[in-house]
Image: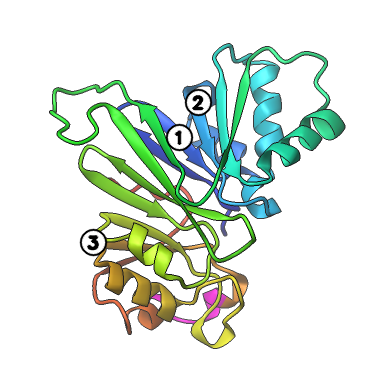
Amino acid sequence: DRNMSGYLLEADGKKILFDSGAGTIRQLLKLKINLLNIDNIFYTHLHNDHVNDLGAIIWSNNYGIKRKKPLNIHGPKGFKKYFKILMEKILKPTKLNYKIKVKEIWNGSIIKIPINRTNNKIISKNKNNMIIKSIKSEHTDASVSYGIEYNNRSIVYSGDTDYSDEIIKISKNADLLILECSHPDNMKAKGHLTPFLCGKIAAKANVKKLVLTHFYPEADKVDIKKQCSRTFNGKIVLARDFMSIEV
């Protein structure tokens, strides 16, 4: 029922992709999203279910639609090595029609993305920039979570992570917190969260809305929302493909 990890953020016409597991391109096309309008991609870690469609994105932008403007790709430490292998050993394009700018992200990295506003609202914070901050997540040695701030709104996307004080800090008073919730409470796995722990993070961070995602099949067999509500009494949403949330 669910595709692998891929989250599209839209703000005043700017489209930013977070992770791209297998099938992400197909899902974007179903939403009639033009790949040429996605100029920035952020990866949380290099596990296949989060990065698998990167090669397909690069290929699709080079043949057929033929991107001309640069594609900015951000990933954790080790991403440049991964990208080099992908390009030289797997894709091996005879010619790349556009530039790809690769940047590694680590704990504490801050990226500013200029936004051209499509309305007349005054942005009192950071002016026309979207601010994307990263923290170390408890999953792989280099995995990160992202906090996004724009127009006095904030979103946090955990990627895969275990419980940590860092994810609570970056999520403080967030308008929207997207947390992985791989297993039910009785099947805790290292490097992943359960509903109880997700609720605990959301409560300590005082977030306005919590979205649970990244469900393993075992999570379908229990009432995830009920388990989470034991520790968080705020708004809880179970993610589904093509869900759209306005912040």
Q: Is residue 184 left or right of residue 77?
A: left
Residue 116, picture quadrant: top left
Q: Secondary structure at mark 2?
A: strand
User: Please, is residue 230 above or below residue 54 in the view?
Assistant: below
As for residue 188 lying within the magenta part, the answer is no
Residue 208, picture quadrant: bottom left
> What amino acid is labelled 3 in the image?
Lys
According to the picture, the residue beneath numbered tag 1 turns out to be: 16
Q: CA distance from mark 1 to mark 2?
A: 7 Å
Within 10 Å of disc 2 (Cα), the crowding (few <14, some 14-19, many 20+) is: some
As for residue 222 lying within the magenta part, the answer is yes
User: Please, is residue 36 above or below residue 196 in the view?
Assistant: above
Q: Secondary structure at mark 3?
A: loop
According to the picture, the residue beneath numbered tag 2 turns out to be: 39
- For marks 3 and 2 on the same chain, the one whose residue lies earlier in the sequence: 2
Q: Position of residue 211 (x, y in %)?
A: 38, 61
At 66% from the left edge and 37% from the top edge, which residue is drawn? 54
Camera-nearest residue between 9 and 72: 72
Q: Which mark is residue 85?
A: none
> What amino acid is labelled 2 in the image?
Asp
Q: Secondary structure at mark 1?
A: strand
The magenta segment is: 219-225
